[in-house]
Image: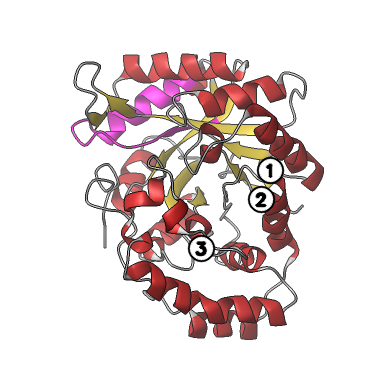
Amino acid sequence: MQKRQLGQNGPMVSAIGLGAWSFGGAYGPTDEAESHATLAGALELGIDFIDTANVYGNGVSETVIGTFIKDHPNRFRIATKAGIWRHPETNVRGFNNAPDYLRAELEKSLTRLGIDHVELFYIHRRDPNLPIEEVTGTLVRFIDEGKIGGFGFSEIAPWSLRRAAAVYPVMAVQSEYSLWTRSPEVGMIRACKDLGTAFVPFSPLGRGMFVADPPDPAGFADNDFRKNSPRFLEPNFSANLKALEPFREFASTRGANPAALAVAWTLSRGDHLIPIPGTRSLAHLRDHAEGAALALSADDLAEIDRILPPGFAHGDRYSDAQWPGAERYC
């Protein structure tokens, strides 16, 4: 597995990471044994960068990773997140970047993971009422205390990144980016490159749409994130499924599975990109890892662009209820 640097002063990590949201049941039921098999497979494939968060399964994802790394210490570089908060009485979703809250959540994450340090700690969503410069100062203190190696932000705008980076180097920015979600090309990927910040695309496989066997929305559980996602609702879903047929055919002519082709495309967008496709399936993980070894020519990239031009997807990437917290900039 090729390596890429996690920020200008960060460690070298596998070019493809593993997103662990599904370990907490985001896309259907799972168990510890299945997650552990996926983590073991990641090590065999040379994948050493794991992405999780305190809210993934309300701590389940971090706990499952913790029980695995207890017997496999110092094998993974781990990123986790905090900042999404629910009111204890109303359960209304909001965002909390206050120093005491972030510190308490980081300590809980470290306890669940069974370690005293994470390589990367993200603000999962920004609290717009708190200046990002103040939040950055809190995160710098965590670095000074040895609790985190570096920090990042998820789903922020380029102008927020530049404000934070003026205080201290930002290790990574995480945003949704794939062949059907191209908005980071309007400023964010370039801003990260300019500032020495790694750009970490999540959902580079379109939440399962770019795999060999795309999902059937009829089988989504009630708590599946895609249940109310516009791109998975009709008539959008059928239109998107049809649009992806030529892409799967092109992958076949290249002797590749479509997931590997989609990952390879993402890697081709810049040497500071480290995509983190998520899965709880070892078979799917092997498909993703093939993308790191798949070299795409200029002709390949031109053909992919012809088949799936920017903006081809039908429907927004989030519903109105899912949008709050993600900063819009285009």
Where residue 7 sits in the image (x, y, percent)? 56, 44
Q: Distance between the residues labelled 3 and 1?
A: 29 Å
Q: Answer yes or no: do the residues labelled 2 and 3 have beta carbons within 8 Å?
A: no
Frontmost residue, 45 versus 175: 45
Q: Do the residues labelled 1 and 2 touch (CB within 8 Å)?
A: yes
Which picture quadrant has residue 189? bottom left
Q: Residue 227: where, in percent of width, then height?
A: 36, 50
| Callout 2: SS | strand
- Which residue is tagged 3? 209
- Please say whether residue 49 is visible from this viewpoint: yes
Quick one: label 1, few (<14), some, or many (20+) residues within 10 Å?
A: some
Question: As drawn, is 156 to the left or to the right of 280?
Answer: left
Residue at mark 2 to residue at mark 3: CA–CA distance:
26 Å
Q: Looking at the image, which residue is at 58% across and 35% down?
A: 30
Q: Name the residue under label 2.
A: 4
Query: At which x and y percent is residue 244?
Result: 50, 75
The residue where tag 1 is placed is: 12
- The image quarter containing residue 290 is bottom right
Amino acid, disc 1:
Met
- Precedes in sequence: disc 1 or disc 2: 2
Residue at image point 45% right, 46% down:
173
